[in-house]
Amino acid sequence: MKKITSTRNLGFLLGLFILSIAFTSCKRNKEVEKPKEPVGEVLINEYCTGEKYFSDNKTFRASATGESMSRETAKKKARSNAEDELARTISATMQIVTDNYVNSSTFNNKEEVTETFNNLARTVVDQKLRGAITICEQTTQKANGNYVNYIALELSGDEVA
C-alpha cells in the first residue's frame, strides 16, 4: 500500500510541475508596441473641428479656417471657406472640358506632328444657404501678429433650398 501512495504522490507532483511550467511560459498580457511618431512632424490641433462638427442625417456642417494680418479679414476668409464647404456638401456639379489638338505640318518632305491635350475640371456650386448658423468660432493670434479664425457652420436639412 505504501508503494501506491508514493506513486500517487509522485504522479501528483509531476502533474503540478508540468502545469507550473505551462502557466509560466504563457503570458496573458503581451505588451503592445506603440507606433513610432513620424520624425520631423508635429500634430496640429484645430479649433471647431472633430466628430461633433461632422454632418449627419439631420444637419449639414462645415469647418474652415482663415488667416490674415487683419482680424476681420481672417473672419471673413474663414466664413467664406466654411460656406463654400457647406454648399459643396449639399450639392456640386462637375464640369469637365477636354481639348485634344493635333497639328500636322510638312517641311522638306518630312512630316512633323504635334499633339496637345488639355483637360480642365471645374466644380460649380449653385446653392442658397439660408439659415446657416455658427456653432463654433475661435480666433487666435500667431507670434508674427497674424490672426487665425476657426469657424464651424451648421445648416438644418429642412432649411436646404
Image: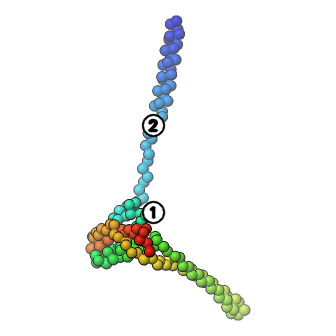
Which residue is rendered at x = 46% and y = 71% of the image?
Answer: 90
Q: Residue furthest right?
A: 109
Percent x, y of residue 22: 49, 30
Say which quarter of the image contains residue 131: bottom left
Toward the viewer: 122 or 102?
122
Q: Decide if residue 33 is in sight here.
A: yes
Q: Is residue 18 above or below residue 158?
A: above
Reply above or below: 80 against 25. below
Task: Please state the horizontal and vertical placement of residue 91, each as a whole percent of the image.
Answer: 48, 73
Label 1: few (<14), some or many (≥20) within 10 Å? few
Task: Name which of mark 2 and mark 1 comes first in the sequence.
Answer: 2
The residue lying furthest to the front in this view is: 158
Which SS class for mark 2? loop
What residue is shown with label 1?
57
The reply to whether residue 62 is in sight is: no
Residue 74 image-quadrant placement: bottom left
Can you tell which mark lies on residue 13?
none
Left or right: residue 69 versus residue 56 is: left
Q: Nearer the viewer, mark 2 or mark 1?
A: 1
Position of 138 with respect to 89 (left or right) is left
What is the three-letter code of the residue carrying label 2? Arg
Q: Residue at x 44, y 39 (%)?
A: 29
Does dot 1 land on a helix, a strand or a loop?
A: loop
At label 1, the amino acid type is Asn
121 on left or right of 151? right
- Mark number, residue 28: 2
Q: Residue 146 at what x, y percent from top left?
A: 29, 74
Work out whether residue 55 or residue 6 is closer to the camera in this orientation and state it. 55
Residue drawn at (28%, 75%), measured in percent from left and top?
Answer: 71
